[in-house]
Image: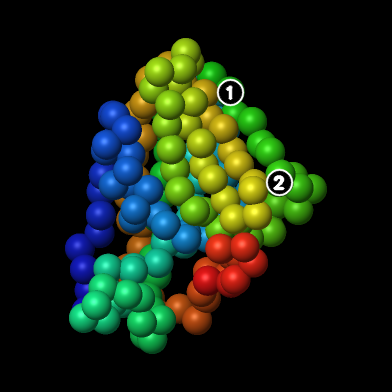
Amino acid sequence: MSRAPIKLRAEDEEDLAIIAACLQDALASLAEMSYDRAGPRFALVVERFLWEEATTKQGLPTGRGLRARRAGLHFEGVSAVRYRGIDRRQPTAILELLTVLCDTRATPNTISLMFAGGAEIKVEADSLRCYMRDLELPHRTRLRPSHRIDGGRRS
């Protein structure tokens, strides 16, 4: 089953919620993130799970036959990027993306990439201009999110 690649743009918080849903539990590493001050752009490549393909009749993930695909995500008009709870000396460490949020009331806009374990990347931008695009064909994966939820239970 080969789904067409997704290509999305977010210009408000409602749009960003759709991108965040597509990227839930995506795997990332600092080695595949870049802040281009001249751009000015912050970009990253993630391995996103195709949860939409792996559900039971009750809508819950089955975990069997899970597929993933690499996707690019970038933000335009970026003035600063701040890291919290991330060891930047380990650029290949895997980070599990929980969600992406934006506070458009803040000046500049503050976009938060929230990762498992309390890690966070805050992107400051003049406005919300976010783009997500699938980069490769889907492939089977044995990887699974393993972050802690509900007081220590692993998902």
Left-right relation of 70 to 145: left
Determine the residue positioned at 64% across, 48% down: 118
Give the mark toward the camera: 1 or 2: 2
Q: In which quarter of the image is residue 116?
A: bottom right
Work out which residue is located at the far bottom of the displayed protein and give it.
64
User: Could you say where residue 54 lies in the image, as x and y percent from the top left?
Assistant: 31, 77
Residue assigned mark 1: 80
Mark identifier at residue 31: none
User: Could you say where residue 31 lies in the image, as x and y percent from the top left?
Assistant: 63, 51
Q: Is mark 1 on a helix, strand or loop?
A: strand
Left-right relation of 141 to 15: right
Q: How far apart are marks 1 and 2 (CA)?
A: 16 Å
Q: What element carries label 2?
A: loop
User: Could you say where residue 100 lies in the image, as x and y percent from the top left?
Assistant: 44, 43
**Kind of residue at badge 1:** Ala
How many residues crowd around disc 2 within 10 Å: few (fewer than 14), some, or many (20 or more)? some
Does the image show residue 77? no
Determine the residue positioned at 36% across, 35% down: 130
Mark identifier at residue 86: 2
Q: Is residue 43 above or below residue 96?
A: above
Q: Is residue 110 above or below residue 29?
A: above
Q: Which of 124 and 30 is in front in this view?
A: 124
- The quadrant of the rendering that contains the N terminus is bottom left
Left-right relation of 39 to 64: right
